[in-house]
Image (cartoon, helix red, strand yellow):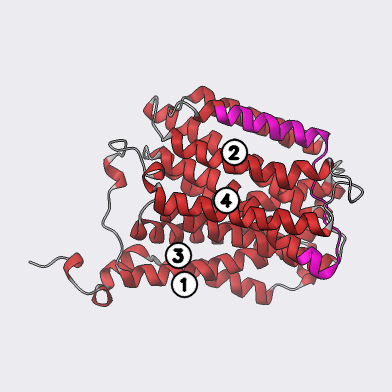
Amino acid sequence: MPTDADLPDLIVPSDLRRVIPIWSWAVPAMAWLCLSLITPAAFAGWGVAVLGAVLFATVFAAVHHAEVIAHRIGEPFGTLVLALAVTVIEVALIVSIMLSAKGAESSLARDTVFAAVMLACNGVLGICLLVAGIRFGEPLFRARAASSYLAVLAVLATAALVLPEFTHTAPGPVYSPAQLVFVAIVAVVLYGVFLFVQTVRHRDYFLPVGGNVTPDAHAPPPSGAATGVAALLLVVALGAVVLLAKKLSPELEAAMRAAHVAQPAAAVGVIVAALVLLPEAVSAIRAARINRLQTSVNLALGSALASIALTIPAVAAVALWTGQPLELGLGDTGLVFLALTFVVTTMTLSSGRATVLQGAVHLTILALFLFLVIVP
Protein backbone atom coordinates (compact mmCIF):
# COMPACT_ATOMS: atom_id res chain seq x y z
CA MET A 1 0.00 0.00 0.00
CA PRO A 2 1.54 3.40 -0.96
CA THR A 3 2.38 5.88 1.76
CA ASP A 4 2.44 9.69 1.67
CA ALA A 5 6.12 9.51 0.80
CA ASP A 6 5.29 7.58 -2.38
CA LEU A 7 2.70 10.11 -3.60
CA PRO A 8 3.30 13.40 -5.41
CA ASP A 9 3.63 16.34 -3.03
CA LEU A 10 0.58 18.18 -4.37
CA ILE A 11 -1.86 15.35 -3.60
CA VAL A 12 -1.10 14.97 0.10
CA PRO A 13 -3.55 17.43 1.72
CA SER A 14 -3.38 15.57 5.02
CA ASP A 15 0.32 16.45 5.25
CA LEU A 16 -0.48 20.11 4.64
CA ARG A 17 -3.07 20.07 7.42
CA ARG A 18 -0.62 18.30 9.71
CA VAL A 19 2.29 20.74 9.37
CA ILE A 20 0.30 23.96 8.77
CA PRO A 21 -2.30 24.08 11.56
CA ILE A 22 -4.92 26.82 11.52
CA TRP A 23 -3.29 28.95 14.22
CA SER A 24 0.00 29.11 12.29
CA TRP A 25 -1.56 31.14 9.45
CA ALA A 26 -4.32 32.82 11.43
CA VAL A 27 -1.89 34.56 13.78
CA PRO A 28 0.17 36.29 11.02
CA ALA A 29 -3.10 37.29 9.35
CA MET A 30 -4.26 38.81 12.63
CA ALA A 31 -0.92 40.64 12.93
CA TRP A 32 -1.35 42.31 9.55
CA LEU A 33 -4.94 43.16 10.43
CA CYS A 34 -3.83 44.83 13.66
CA LEU A 35 -1.16 46.79 11.78
CA SER A 36 -3.80 48.22 9.47
CA LEU A 37 -6.47 48.90 12.12
CA ILE A 38 -4.62 50.13 15.22
CA THR A 39 -3.88 53.85 14.84
CA PRO A 40 -1.27 55.94 16.71
CA ALA A 41 -4.07 57.35 18.89
CA ALA A 42 -4.69 53.87 20.29
CA PHE A 43 -1.17 53.73 21.69
CA ALA A 44 -2.29 55.73 24.70
CA GLY A 45 -3.71 52.56 26.20
CA TRP A 46 -4.90 49.25 24.80
CA GLY A 47 -3.02 49.51 21.49
CA VAL A 48 0.40 48.73 22.96
CA ALA A 49 -0.90 45.71 24.89
CA VAL A 50 -2.69 44.29 21.85
CA LEU A 51 0.26 44.76 19.50
CA GLY A 52 2.64 43.30 22.07
CA ALA A 53 0.52 40.17 22.49
CA VAL A 54 0.12 39.76 18.73
CA LEU A 55 3.86 40.27 18.25
CA PHE A 56 4.73 37.40 20.58
CA ALA A 57 2.15 35.13 18.97
CA THR A 58 3.49 35.98 15.50
CA VAL A 59 7.03 35.15 16.58
CA PHE A 60 5.89 31.67 17.61
CA ALA A 61 4.13 31.25 14.27
CA ALA A 62 7.39 32.17 12.52
CA VAL A 63 9.21 29.60 14.65
CA HIS A 64 6.76 26.91 13.60
CA HIS A 65 7.16 27.62 9.88
CA ALA A 66 10.96 27.83 10.17
CA GLU A 67 11.03 24.46 11.90
CA VAL A 68 8.90 22.94 9.11
CA ILE A 69 11.45 24.15 6.55
CA ALA A 70 14.36 22.98 8.71
CA HIS A 71 12.84 19.50 9.03
CA ARG A 72 12.48 19.25 5.27
CA ILE A 73 15.99 20.38 4.26
CA GLY A 74 17.90 18.91 7.22
CA GLU A 75 20.94 20.12 9.11
CA PRO A 76 22.84 22.37 9.03
CA PHE A 77 20.72 24.11 6.39
CA GLY A 78 17.68 24.26 8.65
CA THR A 79 19.35 26.27 11.38
CA LEU A 80 21.01 28.44 8.75
CA VAL A 81 17.63 29.30 7.21
CA LEU A 82 16.27 30.40 10.58
CA ALA A 83 19.43 32.38 11.42
CA LEU A 84 19.33 34.25 8.12
CA ALA A 85 15.59 34.88 8.32
CA VAL A 86 15.85 36.30 11.82
CA THR A 87 18.83 38.45 10.86
CA VAL A 88 16.82 39.89 7.97
CA ILE A 89 14.30 41.01 10.61
CA GLU A 90 17.05 42.67 12.63
CA VAL A 91 18.57 44.44 9.63
CA ALA A 92 15.19 45.66 8.36
CA LEU A 93 14.18 46.89 11.79
CA ILE A 94 17.42 48.77 12.49
CA VAL A 95 17.58 50.30 9.03
CA SER A 96 13.94 51.41 9.14
CA ILE A 97 14.41 53.04 12.57
CA MET A 98 17.64 54.72 11.40
CA LEU A 99 15.93 56.17 8.33
CA SER A 100 12.92 57.41 10.28
CA ALA A 101 15.01 58.83 13.14
CA LYS A 102 17.30 60.78 10.74
CA GLY A 103 20.48 60.46 12.77
CA ALA A 104 18.96 60.42 16.26
CA GLU A 105 19.62 56.68 16.64
CA SER A 106 23.33 56.60 15.75
CA SER A 107 24.10 53.94 18.39
CA LEU A 108 21.08 51.69 17.78
CA ALA A 109 22.97 49.27 15.51
CA ARG A 110 25.81 48.91 18.03
CA ASP A 111 23.48 48.47 20.99
CA THR A 112 21.30 45.94 19.17
CA VAL A 113 24.18 43.87 17.75
CA PHE A 114 26.01 43.84 21.08
CA ALA A 115 22.82 42.86 22.89
CA ALA A 116 22.22 40.12 20.32
CA VAL A 117 25.68 38.68 20.97
CA MET A 118 25.17 38.79 24.73
CA LEU A 119 21.67 37.31 24.57
CA ALA A 120 22.66 34.57 22.12
CA CYS A 121 25.97 33.52 23.71
CA ASN A 122 24.82 33.82 27.31
CA GLY A 123 21.03 33.72 27.32
CA VAL A 124 20.04 31.27 24.58
CA LEU A 125 23.15 29.11 24.98
CA GLY A 126 22.93 29.24 28.77
CA ILE A 127 19.29 28.11 28.87
CA CYS A 128 19.98 25.32 26.37
CA LEU A 129 22.96 24.05 28.36
CA LEU A 130 20.92 24.17 31.56
CA VAL A 131 17.89 22.40 30.05
CA ALA A 132 19.97 19.73 28.30
CA GLY A 133 22.14 19.23 31.39
CA ILE A 134 19.12 18.74 33.66
CA ARG A 135 17.39 16.31 31.29
CA PHE A 136 20.34 14.31 29.97
CA GLY A 137 23.25 14.75 32.39
CA GLU A 138 26.16 15.42 30.01
CA PRO A 139 24.79 15.91 26.49
CA LEU A 140 27.26 15.98 23.61
CA PHE A 141 27.94 18.43 20.80
CA ARG A 142 30.77 18.91 18.31
CA ALA A 143 33.58 21.08 19.67
CA ARG A 144 34.94 21.63 16.13
CA ALA A 145 31.72 23.36 15.11
CA ALA A 146 31.72 25.53 18.22
CA SER A 147 35.36 26.57 17.68
CA SER A 148 34.57 27.50 14.08
CA TYR A 149 31.72 29.73 15.18
CA LEU A 150 33.75 31.34 17.95
CA ALA A 151 36.80 32.07 15.79
CA VAL A 152 34.75 33.96 13.19
CA LEU A 153 32.56 35.60 15.81
CA ALA A 154 35.56 36.88 17.80
CA VAL A 155 37.16 38.45 14.72
CA LEU A 156 33.98 40.14 13.52
CA ALA A 157 32.98 41.35 17.00
CA THR A 158 36.44 42.85 17.48
CA ALA A 159 36.34 44.55 14.08
CA ALA A 160 32.83 45.91 14.52
CA LEU A 161 32.56 46.68 18.25
CA VAL A 162 36.09 47.02 19.68
CA LEU A 163 38.44 48.60 17.14
CA PRO A 164 36.34 51.77 16.57
CA GLU A 165 37.28 52.79 20.12
CA PHE A 166 40.99 52.69 19.26
CA THR A 167 41.24 54.12 15.73
CA HIS A 168 42.44 57.70 15.17
CA THR A 169 41.25 58.73 11.69
CA ALA A 170 37.78 59.74 12.90
CA PRO A 171 37.01 61.18 16.36
CA GLY A 172 34.87 59.18 18.76
CA PRO A 173 33.80 55.53 18.65
CA VAL A 174 33.27 55.64 14.89
CA TYR A 175 35.03 54.51 11.72
CA SER A 176 35.99 56.79 8.86
CA PRO A 177 34.13 56.06 5.60
CA ALA A 178 37.12 54.12 4.21
CA GLN A 179 37.44 52.07 7.40
CA LEU A 180 33.70 51.39 7.45
CA VAL A 181 33.74 50.12 3.85
CA PHE A 182 36.74 47.88 4.54
CA VAL A 183 35.19 46.36 7.69
CA ALA A 184 31.89 45.77 5.88
CA ILE A 185 33.69 43.93 3.06
CA VAL A 186 35.71 41.86 5.53
CA ALA A 187 32.52 40.89 7.37
CA VAL A 188 30.74 39.74 4.21
CA VAL A 189 33.75 37.83 2.83
CA LEU A 190 34.57 36.06 6.10
CA TYR A 191 30.93 35.12 6.64
CA GLY A 192 30.76 33.77 3.09
CA VAL A 193 33.80 31.57 3.76
CA PHE A 194 32.17 30.35 6.97
CA LEU A 195 28.95 29.45 5.15
CA PHE A 196 30.96 27.49 2.56
CA VAL A 197 32.66 25.54 5.35
CA GLN A 198 29.37 25.00 7.20
CA THR A 199 27.30 23.82 4.25
CA VAL A 200 29.85 22.26 1.85
CA ARG A 201 33.46 21.69 2.86
CA HIS A 202 33.02 20.54 6.47
CA ARG A 203 29.29 20.11 6.78
CA ASP A 204 29.76 17.11 9.07
CA TYR A 205 31.19 19.39 11.77
CA PHE A 206 27.76 20.96 12.26
CA LEU A 207 25.56 17.85 12.22
CA PRO A 208 24.03 16.48 15.45
CA VAL A 209 26.17 13.96 17.26
CA GLY A 210 25.05 10.42 16.29
CA GLY A 211 22.94 8.60 18.78
CA ASN A 212 21.99 11.56 20.97
CA VAL A 213 18.45 11.95 19.64
CA THR A 214 15.43 10.88 21.62
CA PRO A 215 12.53 9.00 19.95
CA ASP A 216 10.26 12.05 19.91
CA ALA A 217 12.71 13.84 17.61
CA HIS A 218 11.68 11.53 14.74
CA ALA A 219 8.76 12.55 12.54
CA PRO A 220 8.06 12.17 8.83
CA PRO A 221 9.44 15.14 6.87
CA PRO A 222 6.84 17.47 5.35
CA SER A 223 5.97 17.32 1.67
CA GLY A 224 7.26 19.83 -0.84
CA ALA A 225 3.87 21.54 -1.01
CA ALA A 226 3.71 21.93 2.77
CA THR A 227 7.27 23.24 2.85
CA GLY A 228 6.48 25.80 0.15
CA VAL A 229 3.44 27.04 2.07
CA ALA A 230 5.52 27.22 5.26
CA ALA A 231 8.18 29.28 3.46
CA LEU A 232 5.55 31.74 2.24
CA LEU A 233 3.97 32.01 5.68
CA LEU A 234 7.42 32.46 7.25
CA VAL A 235 8.00 35.54 5.07
CA VAL A 236 4.54 36.87 5.97
CA ALA A 237 5.12 36.31 9.69
CA LEU A 238 8.62 37.81 9.70
CA GLY A 239 7.39 40.88 7.84
CA ALA A 240 4.68 41.37 10.45
CA VAL A 241 7.23 41.01 13.24
CA VAL A 242 9.42 43.74 11.70
CA LEU A 243 6.55 46.20 11.35
CA LEU A 244 5.09 45.43 14.77
CA ALA A 245 8.46 45.87 16.45
CA LYS A 246 9.07 49.12 14.57
CA LYS A 247 5.66 50.41 15.64
CA LEU A 248 6.33 49.52 19.27
CA SER A 249 9.95 50.74 19.52
CA PRO A 250 9.12 54.45 20.18
CA GLU A 251 6.74 53.38 22.92
CA LEU A 252 9.41 51.15 24.41
CA GLU A 253 11.95 53.98 24.57
CA ALA A 254 9.34 56.30 26.09
CA ALA A 255 8.58 53.64 28.70
CA MET A 256 12.29 53.29 29.50
CA ARG A 257 12.58 57.04 30.00
CA ALA A 258 9.46 57.13 32.14
CA ALA A 259 10.92 54.35 34.29
CA HIS A 260 14.09 56.47 34.71
CA VAL A 261 16.33 53.83 33.14
CA ALA A 262 19.84 55.32 32.99
CA GLN A 263 20.52 54.06 29.43
CA PRO A 264 17.17 54.03 27.60
CA ALA A 265 18.74 53.61 24.14
CA ALA A 266 20.77 50.59 25.31
CA ALA A 267 17.68 49.14 26.99
CA VAL A 268 15.71 49.50 23.74
CA GLY A 269 18.59 47.77 21.93
CA VAL A 270 18.29 44.84 24.34
CA ILE A 271 14.53 44.65 23.86
CA VAL A 272 14.82 44.80 20.06
CA ALA A 273 17.51 42.10 20.09
CA ALA A 274 15.38 39.93 22.39
CA LEU A 275 12.37 40.25 20.09
CA VAL A 276 14.49 39.43 17.06
CA LEU A 277 16.15 36.43 18.71
CA LEU A 278 12.96 35.00 20.18
CA PRO A 279 12.21 32.65 17.23
CA GLU A 280 15.70 31.16 17.36
CA ALA A 281 15.63 30.97 21.15
CA VAL A 282 12.42 28.96 21.12
CA SER A 283 13.77 26.59 18.46
CA ALA A 284 17.10 26.19 20.28
CA ILE A 285 15.43 25.38 23.60
CA ARG A 286 13.13 22.86 21.92
CA ALA A 287 16.16 21.19 20.36
CA ALA A 288 17.90 21.05 23.75
CA ARG A 289 14.85 19.37 25.29
CA ILE A 290 15.09 16.46 22.82
CA ASN A 291 18.87 16.06 23.21
CA ARG A 292 19.86 17.82 19.99
CA LEU A 293 22.31 20.18 21.66
CA GLN A 294 24.34 20.58 18.48
CA THR A 295 21.31 22.20 16.86
CA SER A 296 21.00 24.50 19.87
CA VAL A 297 24.67 25.51 19.59
CA ASN A 298 24.24 26.11 15.85
CA LEU A 299 21.24 28.35 16.47
CA ALA A 300 22.73 30.32 19.37
CA LEU A 301 26.16 31.00 17.89
CA GLY A 302 24.83 31.20 14.34
CA SER A 303 22.39 33.95 15.29
CA ALA A 304 25.14 35.97 16.98
CA LEU A 305 27.44 35.52 14.00
CA ALA A 306 24.81 36.41 11.41
CA SER A 307 23.80 39.43 13.47
CA ILE A 308 27.27 40.96 13.19
CA ALA A 309 28.20 39.70 9.72
CA LEU A 310 25.01 40.93 8.01
CA THR A 311 23.79 43.81 10.16
CA ILE A 312 27.03 45.82 10.21
CA PRO A 313 27.48 45.89 6.40
CA ALA A 314 23.80 46.82 5.94
CA VAL A 315 23.81 49.69 8.42
CA ALA A 316 27.22 50.79 7.12
CA ALA A 317 25.74 51.09 3.63
CA VAL A 318 22.79 53.10 4.98
CA ALA A 319 25.08 55.38 7.00
CA LEU A 320 27.35 56.04 4.02
CA TRP A 321 24.41 56.61 1.68
CA THR A 322 22.52 58.99 3.99
CA GLY A 323 25.52 60.59 5.70
CA GLN A 324 24.19 59.65 9.13
CA PRO A 325 26.62 59.10 12.02
CA LEU A 326 27.17 55.49 13.06
CA GLU A 327 28.61 54.80 16.50
CA LEU A 328 30.06 51.29 16.74
CA GLY A 329 32.68 51.25 19.51
CA LEU A 330 31.69 49.88 22.91
CA GLY A 331 32.43 51.62 26.17
CA ASP A 332 34.55 50.16 28.96
CA THR A 333 31.75 48.06 30.47
CA GLY A 334 30.76 46.66 27.10
CA LEU A 335 34.34 45.71 26.29
CA VAL A 336 34.65 43.85 29.60
CA PHE A 337 31.42 41.92 29.02
CA LEU A 338 32.40 41.06 25.44
CA ALA A 339 35.81 39.74 26.54
CA LEU A 340 34.29 37.79 29.45
CA THR A 341 31.68 36.25 27.15
CA PHE A 342 34.25 35.01 24.64
CA VAL A 343 36.58 33.64 27.31
CA VAL A 344 33.84 31.76 29.15
CA THR A 345 32.16 30.53 25.95
CA THR A 346 35.48 29.17 24.69
CA MET A 347 36.00 27.27 27.94
CA THR A 348 32.39 26.04 27.93
CA LEU A 349 32.43 24.65 24.40
CA SER A 350 35.98 23.33 24.19
CA SER A 351 35.17 19.90 25.66
CA GLY A 352 32.15 18.97 23.52
CA ARG A 353 30.14 18.18 26.67
CA ALA A 354 27.64 20.28 28.60
CA THR A 355 26.65 20.45 32.26
CA VAL A 356 24.16 22.46 34.28
CA LEU A 357 27.04 24.45 35.82
CA GLN A 358 28.06 25.84 32.44
CA GLY A 359 24.50 26.91 31.78
CA ALA A 360 24.30 28.62 35.16
CA VAL A 361 27.57 30.49 34.51
CA HIS A 362 26.34 31.89 31.20
CA LEU A 363 23.01 32.94 32.68
CA THR A 364 24.86 34.71 35.49
CA ILE A 365 26.83 36.75 32.94
CA LEU A 366 23.57 37.65 31.20
CA ALA A 367 21.97 38.70 34.49
CA LEU A 368 24.93 40.98 35.27
CA PHE A 369 24.76 42.50 31.79
CA LEU A 370 21.02 43.22 32.00
CA PHE A 371 21.26 44.65 35.51
CA LEU A 372 24.09 47.02 34.56
CA VAL A 373 22.13 48.24 31.53
CA ILE A 374 19.44 49.40 33.96
CA VAL A 375 21.77 50.44 36.80
CA PRO A 376 25.13 51.29 35.14
Q: Nearer the viewer, mark 2 or mark 4?
A: 2
Residue furthest to the left: 1
Q: Which residues are magenta?
A: 318-346
| Label 1 vs 4, first from the N-terminus | 1
- Up the image or down, 141 lies above or below 46; here it is above
Which of the two residues, 301 or 277, is positioned nearer the viewer here?
A: 301
Residue holding disc 2: 121
C-alpha span from label 4 to label 3: 18 Å
Q: Nearer the viewer, mark 3 or mark 1?
A: 1
Q: Is residue 273 left or right of residue 58?
A: right
Q: Is residue 331 magenta?
A: yes
C-alpha span from label 3 to label 1: 15 Å
Residue holding disc 1: 232
Residue holding disc 3: 23
Q: Is residue 306 left or right of residue 178?
A: left
| Label 3 vs 1, first from the N-terminus | 3
Q: Nearer the viewer, mark 4 or mark 3?
A: 4
**Dot 4 and dot 3 residues touching (CB under 8 Å):** no
Mark 2 residue type = Cys
C-alpha span from label 2 to label 3: 31 Å
Q: Is residue 76 visible?
A: no
| Label 1 vs 2, first from the N-terminus | 2
CA neighbours of label 1 inside 10 A, class few (<14), some (14 to 19), many (20+): few
> Which disc number belongs to residue 39?
none
C-alpha span from label 2 to label 4: 14 Å
CA neighbours of label 3 inside 10 A, class few (<14), some (14 to 19), many (20+): few
| Secondary structure state at the residue bearing disc 3 | helix
C-alpha span from label 1 to label 2: 30 Å
Identify the main secondary structure in magenta. helix
